Image: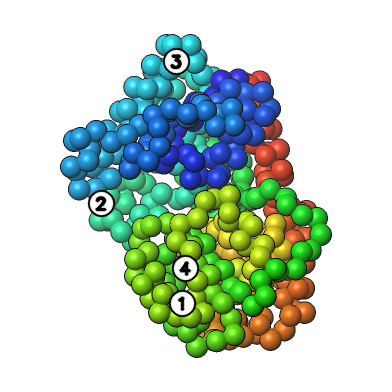
Amino acid sequence: MKILMLLSNPYIVDPRVSHEANALVSAGHKVTVIVWDRNHLYPSEATINGVRVVRFHNSWLMRILPHDLLRNPFWWMHAARKGVELFKNGFDFDVVHCHDLDTLSSGFFLKKKFNVKLVYDAHEIFGYMIEKDMPSFVVWFSFLMEKKLLKNVDDIITVDVGYASYFEESSDKPITIIRNCKDIITKEYIPPSNNKFSVVYIGTLAASRFFPDVLSVFEDIEDVQFIIAGKKEGLYDEVESLAKKLKNVTFLGTIPVTDVVPLTLKCHVVLCLFDPSIRMNQIGSPNKLFEAMVCGRPIIVTKGTHSGKIVDELQMGLSIDFSEESLKNAVRTLHDDPQLCKTYGRNALKAGLTEYNWPQQQKKLLDLYQKLKSK
């Protein structure tokens, strides 16, 4: 089959999408991805592991607009127009695979124009994701837009059971859960290689992830090293500035996606505290959870979240309150009990080997496309 994917980021920074695209190419499908490279960081076109990537860069008008909310319609028009161009020039795709709501209107247009299949791959519940940052009418409109567009999709892909429950309430379309799991890197437990007990966080640096408060915790624990890496956005500059003042905090800045798992493997504990008052955090499973699993590392997460529930069920770490005191106690507990750390790590690895790994998710994706082919 020929598959056109639509994605509102530059692709190279999105491991979920590249995992899916690579899996489809390996199975014999042809995949082209139209992406939005907002900051013009990458060339207009590239082929990566057999996947053709066609990038859209902001026009001069888009650059002077104050917010992506206003730029979105330009992106939707371009994605649709480029899809038409590709179809007419020989890439007569059978399926449009839309990653998140900010591509779905373009996919709907292409489905209607060329009578192709439409897959909605919801990495997020979009309305939940923006409700803390956007005016209420924008959030309301996103829920309404999604509900209307869902009537036209053929299949829904989403990332976990909480998301699936949400879509079951608003759509009668088939739903496939494909988690953001990682490739298996080892079948045996590998001890951490850092000489000093180390806690690692790699991800968004935001208040909803307990930054910068988390730095105060490690300031008081001298025999523990806290390692941080994140994108240059949000509280990046503030966290970097504060980290430089603390001798037991190492700030790595932005690191390549390929370095995430090796860095996690070196450390003793993964940190992943999400604010449990945010609806998205209550139902989502962060990438850190799956990275901890394939590396065989214990993880500290927040009570009242889906990840907290999984960690408790699998006994692969500690779920704690979203507070400095709780985090301090959790770090000290794991630091003072190496055997407990090892037990949690082994339980994490067992989960990664048996269920929570990319080969298991890949099979579900390929089965879905086999069904689409036979429809």
Figure check: 190 above or below 166: below
Query: Does 102 sit left or right of 352 as displayed?
Result: left
User: How many numbered dots are placed on residues in this image?
Assistant: 4
Residue 325: x, y in percent?
Answer: 51, 86
Q: Who is closer to the viewer here, 368 or 301? A: 301
Residue 129: x, y in percent?
Answer: 40, 55
Q: Residue type at mark 2: give it.
A: Phe
For discs 1 and 3, the disc positioned in front in the rendered view? 1
Q: Is the N terminus in the top left, top right, bottom left or bottom right quadrant? A: top right
First in sequence, mark 1 or 3: give its number. 3
First in sequence, mark 2 or 3: give its number. 3
Q: Residues within 10 Å of mark 4 (few under 14, many from 20)?
A: some
Q: Mark 1: which secondary structure?
A: helix
Q: CA distance from mark 4 to mark 1?
A: 13 Å
- Disc 4 designates what residue? 251
- Disc 1 designates what residue? 214
